[in-house]
Image (spheres, grey):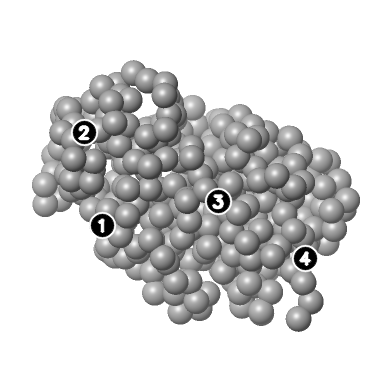
């Protein structure tokens, strides 16, 4: 069997991207990272990995990278990825996600790259009518983040219909956790992710957690999400590319575990795992948040043979606590939903 060919990973210094970089390297793929470092960390890219600083939407830079490194496939992780931020500045999301993806896909077609794995989102479903959500469920995003990702999915589908080009779009549910070699996790002063914020409060790095909405039509009134460990998501990207290389037709795959936890359940689990009581404050709903998002995830397991290793909420929380415990700096109290 010939050795794997080089892969370009956009956003490879960011949260999902850096875990994908390690997963592809561990699988034997030569990796090239492209990241503008707007949110990514250069030090998170493993030593010996080719690195280019720039935008995924810079078609000239991408074209040069594809040619100089003889790239055979692209893994597109680069994106702006906050629902609340997208509600405040939608044009930024259409520019950074949709427009940048247009330029990237064009560079792939012009450069002869015929395989692309795209990090999409469960936000494309909006407020689902079927739970767990199958891939063929209607898509009606309720925030600009989800819409910007859905636009890219449409572009990939249309390009695949008229070019020798195949893709996988991984609709990620709530990504959380930290890998064994990742000491940064997802957090930091600007993080609004529930598990990260709750763990930082438990460790004394933040003041409190705010519940953005306690009157949803769920068992305890708070949002329910399907949490997937970032290392499992990274392995899903590898499985997706291997599937394309083996002749799979590609398309859309949910990436989640198939069960959900409410915000209150997650906060209770954080308190159990950390053995600390945390300050929890009720707040109003946050615009753009659907009540429930849970994956129907049999397709990715069956077709791409994805076998998650961290399918346990307690395990996810423990990896975050471990990654955050070594950070000496304190940040102000912040909320999440």
Give whichever of discs 4 and 3 has the lower sequence position. 4
Marks 4 and 2 in Cβ contact (< 8 Å)? no
The reply, left or right, for residue 38 in relation to residue 15 is: right
Q: Quadrant of residue 333?
A: top left
Dot 3 corresponds to which residue? Answer: 19
The image shows residue 83 at horizontal and vertical percentages of 41, 37
Q: Residue at x 38, y 42 (%)?
A: 322
The reply, left or right, for residue 82 in relation to residue 287 is: right
Give whichever of discs 3 and 2 has the lower sequence position. 3
Calculate the distance from the C-alpha at mark 4 to the C-alpha at mark 2: 46 Å
Give whichever of discs 2 and 1 has the lower sequence position. 2
Mark 3 closeness class: few <14, some 14–19, many ≥20 residues within 10 Å: many
Marks 3 and 2 in Cβ contact (< 8 Å)? no
Dot 1 corresponds to which residue? Answer: 260
Marker disc for residue 74: none
Calculate the distance from the C-alpha at mark 1 to the C-alpha at mark 3: 23 Å
Dot 4 corresponds to which residue? Answer: 5
Element at label 1: loop
Dot 2 corresponds to which residue? Answer: 211
Q: Is the C terminus in the top left, top right, bottom left or bottom right quadrant?
A: top left
Using the rendered image of the protein, determine whether residue 86 is visible from the camera's viewpoint.
yes
> Between residues 157 and 322, which one lies in front from this camera angle?
322
Instruction: Spot the residue most to the left.
Output: 220
Q: Quadrant of residue 28?
A: bottom right
Give whichever of discs 4 and 1 has the lower sequence position. 4
């Amino acid at each position: 069997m010939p050795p794997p060919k080089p892969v370009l990973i956009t956003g490879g210094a960011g949260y999902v991207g850096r875990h994908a970089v390690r997963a592809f390297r561990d699988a034997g793929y030569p990796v090239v990272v492209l990241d503008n470092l707007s949110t990514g960390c250069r030090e998170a890219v493993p030593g010996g990995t080719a690195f280019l600083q720039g935008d995924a939407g810079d078609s000239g830079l991408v074209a040069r990278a594809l040619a100089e490194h003889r790239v055979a496939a692209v893994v597109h992780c680069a994106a702006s990825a906050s629902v609340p931020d997208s509600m405040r500045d939608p044009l930024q999301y259409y520019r950074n996600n949709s427009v940048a993806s247009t330029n990237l896909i064009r560079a792939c077609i012009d450069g002869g790259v015929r395989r692309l794995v795209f990090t999409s989102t469960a936000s494309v479903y909006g407020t689902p009518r079927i739970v767990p959500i199958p891939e063929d469920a209607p898509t009606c995003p309720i925030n600009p983040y989800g819409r910007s990702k859905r636009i890219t999915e449409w572009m990939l589908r249309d390009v695949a219909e008229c070019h020798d080009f195949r893709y996988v779009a991984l609709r990620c549910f709530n990504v959380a956790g930290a890998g064994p070699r990742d000491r940064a996790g997802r957090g930091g002063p600007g993080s609004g992710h529930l598990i990260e914020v709750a763990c930082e409060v438990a460790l004394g790095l933040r003041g409190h957690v705010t519940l953005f909405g306690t009157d949803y039509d769920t068992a305890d009134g708070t949002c329910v999400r399907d949490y997937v460990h970032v290392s499992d998501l990274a392995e899903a990207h590898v499985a997706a590319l291997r599937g394309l290389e083996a002749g799979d037709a590609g398309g859309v795959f949910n990436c989640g575990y198939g069960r959900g936890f409410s915000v209150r359940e997650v906060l209770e689990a954080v308190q159990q795992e950390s053995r600390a009581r945390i300050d929890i404050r009720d707040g109003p709903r946050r615009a753009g948040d659907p009540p429930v998002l849970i994956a129907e995830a049999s397709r990715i397991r069956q077709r791409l043979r994805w076998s998650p290793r961290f399918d346990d909420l307690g395990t996810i929380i423990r990896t975050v606590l471990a990654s955050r415990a070594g950070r000496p700096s304190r940040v102000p109290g912040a909320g999440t939903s």
